[in-house]
């Protein structure tokens, strides 16, 4: 059915109520996110410089701050149709459990084998690589959701896929690894001796169990030295937020259809892609002055990039070979204490979200992991879905807001992103059930060590 009403993108909707274009928030931002810089010259990265690492079409999307709607190629839409539109659910049972007058909705992205929203961007990135005639792609994965999503997309398009998996996850999550291999990916524990940067990191830190930043360095190097390969990244970049806008566009189309307007929109934030995608069309209205929404990013207290980080140019990877991005960062050398939300352990945050936060267009809060698992368990018991620990950060904040409504009697409408399922995170749930989970909040001194590693150059004062 075609829509009447106030959705500005109605012409972009098909019969299936799936968007036919992604929405690029940057087009409506008055203050654009700062460009990526060449780490050597501190000048903005050019298309040509990025070509060695990324696919051409994805670079165009990365650098495009002006086109609001970018058409989703038909082949990608056909793939989306296998698992989209994803469910938008009213959490009646949770509302009742909380005895809140608030109305709570969640957009569930866990209904595909990768178990998360990451497939939305994986298929797009694999598609453009294939279209360019490349042989394959390289990437890193921490908890494993991104690597799984990319493996699925590459299997579908018959592209080779090399995944560098953070060693600690490689060892602790053998099932994730085997899912990736089922889809034909080669999976290497990182740091490894297959790359120069891996060998350098191993020599400096023998016995290290790796980090996301370190795996990124290896994947980037593998793309640079292997003919016909490019590097792809599952979060942080502008292009990834663009692809993830399907989450928000579908949510908004469904809510508009029933005349529902959210007051508060909540998402967990690792590198910022699901949140950036969920809020996209709502933030667009806010940026254009059409409507106001409260938007809340939720991050772990153990890795608090927005709430305690510096807004500065920094490396995206530990090996310091990637371009510099201006973002809220804890420093590329910051290694968060072990916590169980693998997808939220990145030291920085999307430049787009960082700029929006800096300009006061969204809020951020941090939560401790035992409180997160309490919310996860409550949600699983009343709503049936076993949430990923990452997603449970958003549940925690949604529950807290709904409880506030109980106290004030306000009938707010809350929308949150339920990014995925937690079947591969049962060790974390086990720790929680056994009372063995602790909350680590880094001290200011610990954070300072990370800040000391942020590059210093004129114009990068923080
Ligand atoms: C990767 C991941 C996240 C965090 O990544 P963003 O880019 O911040 O969205 C959140 N939830 C799940 C289930 C994930 O796999």
Image (cartoon, rainbow, N blue to C red):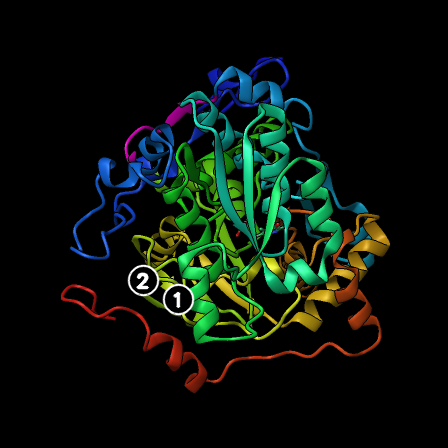
The residue lying at 63 percent from left, 56 percent from top is: 143
- Residue 71 among those drawn in magenta: yes
Instruction: From the viewer's side, name the closer residue of 124 and 218.
Output: 218
- Picture coordinates of residue 90 (x, y %)? 73, 41
Q: For this view, does 31 lie left or right of residue 393?
A: left
Q: Main secondary structure of the magenta part?
A: loop
Query: Is residue 439 located in the magenta-colored stretch of the structure?
Result: no
Q: Is residue 289 visible?
A: no
State whether residue 343 appears in this view.
yes
Q: Position of residue 119 (x, y in %)?
A: 60, 36
User: 365 and 64: which one is in front?
Assistant: 64
The residue carrying pointer 2 sits among few (fewer than 14), some (14 to 19) or many (20 or more) residues within 10 Å by Cα, namely many
As drawn, 354 above or below 155: below
Q: Sequence order check: which comes first, mark 1 or mark 2?
A: 2
Residue at image x 42%, y 79%?
Answer: 447
Q: Nearer the viewer, residue 116 or 194?
A: 194
| Secondary structure of residue under mark 2 | strand
Secondary structure at numbered mark 1: loop
Q: Does residue 244 appear left or right of residue 449 in this picture? A: right
Q: Which residues are magenta?
A: 63-72
Instruction: Identify residue for label 2.
Output: 314
Quarter of the rendering containing residue 429: bottom right
Residue 224: x percent and y percent?
36, 43
Q: Is residue 145 above or below residue 154?
A: below
* Contact (Cβ within 8 Å) of mark 1 with mark 2: yes
Mark 2 Cβ and ligand 1 under 8 Å apart? no
Q: Which mark is residue 101?
A: none
Q: Which residue is mark 1?
A: 332
- Please rate how many residues cluster around mark 1, counting C-alpha atoms within 10 Å: few if below 14, some from 14 to 19, many from 20: many
- Dividing the picture into quadrants, the one containing residue 26 is top left
């Amino acid at each position: 059915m075609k829509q009447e009403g106030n959705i500005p993108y109605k012409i972009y909707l098909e019969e299936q109520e799936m968007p036919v274009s992604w929405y690029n928030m940057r087009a409506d931002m008055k203050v654009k996110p700062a460009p990526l810089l060449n780490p050597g010259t501190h000048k903005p990265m050019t298309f040509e410089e990025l070509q060695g690492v990324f696919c051409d079409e994805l670079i165009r999307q990365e650098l495009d701050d002006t086109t609001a709607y970018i058409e989703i190629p038909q082949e990608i839409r056909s793939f989306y149709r296998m698992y989209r539109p994803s469910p938008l659910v009213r959490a009646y049972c949770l509302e009742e459990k909380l005895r809140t007058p608030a109305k709570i909705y969640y957009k569930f992205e866990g209904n595909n084998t990768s178990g998360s929203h990451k497939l939305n961007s994986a298929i797009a990135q694999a598609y453009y690589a294939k279209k360019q005639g490349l042989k394959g792609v390289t990437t890193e994965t921490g908890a494993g959701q991104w690597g799984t999503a990319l493996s699925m997309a590459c299997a579908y398009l018959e592209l080779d896929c090399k995944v560098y998996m953070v060693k600690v996850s490689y060892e602790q999550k053998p099932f994730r690894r085997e899912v990736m291999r089922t889809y034909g990916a080669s999976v290497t524990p990182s740091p490894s001796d297959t790359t120069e940067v891996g060998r350098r990191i191993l020599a400096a830190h023998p016995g290290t169990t790796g980090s996301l930043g370190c795996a990124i360095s290896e994947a980037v190097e593998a793309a640079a030295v292997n003919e016909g390969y490019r590097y792809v990244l599952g979060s942080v970049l502008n292009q990834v937020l663009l692809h993830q806008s399907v989450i928000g566009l579908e949510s908004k189309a469904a809510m508009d259809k029933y005349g529902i307007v959210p007051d508060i929109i909540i998402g967990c934030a690792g590198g910022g892609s699901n949140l950036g995608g969920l809020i996209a069309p709502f933030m667009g209205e806010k940026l254009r002055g059409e409507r106001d929404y409260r938007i809340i990013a939720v991050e772990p207290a153990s890795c608090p990039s927005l709430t305690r980080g510096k807004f500065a140019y920094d490396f995206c990877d530990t090996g310091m070979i990637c371009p510099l991005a201006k973002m809220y960062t804890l420093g590329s050398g910051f290694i968060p204490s072990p916590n169980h939300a693998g997808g939220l352990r990145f030291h920085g945050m999307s430049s787009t979200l960082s700029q929006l936060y800096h300009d006061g267009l969204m809020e951020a809060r941090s939560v401790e992991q035992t409180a997160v698992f309490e919310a996860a368990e409550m949600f699983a018991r009343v709503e049936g879905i076993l949430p990923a620990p990452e997603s449970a950060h958003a549940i925690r904040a949604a529950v807290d807001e709904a409880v506030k409504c109980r106290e004030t009697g306000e009938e707010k409408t809350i929308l949150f992103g339920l990014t995925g399922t937690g079947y591969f995170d049962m060790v974390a749930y086990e720790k929680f059930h056994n009372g063995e989970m602790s909350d680590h909040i880094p001290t200011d001194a610990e954070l300072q060590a990370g800040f000391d590693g942020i590059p210093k150059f004129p114009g990068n004062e923080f």
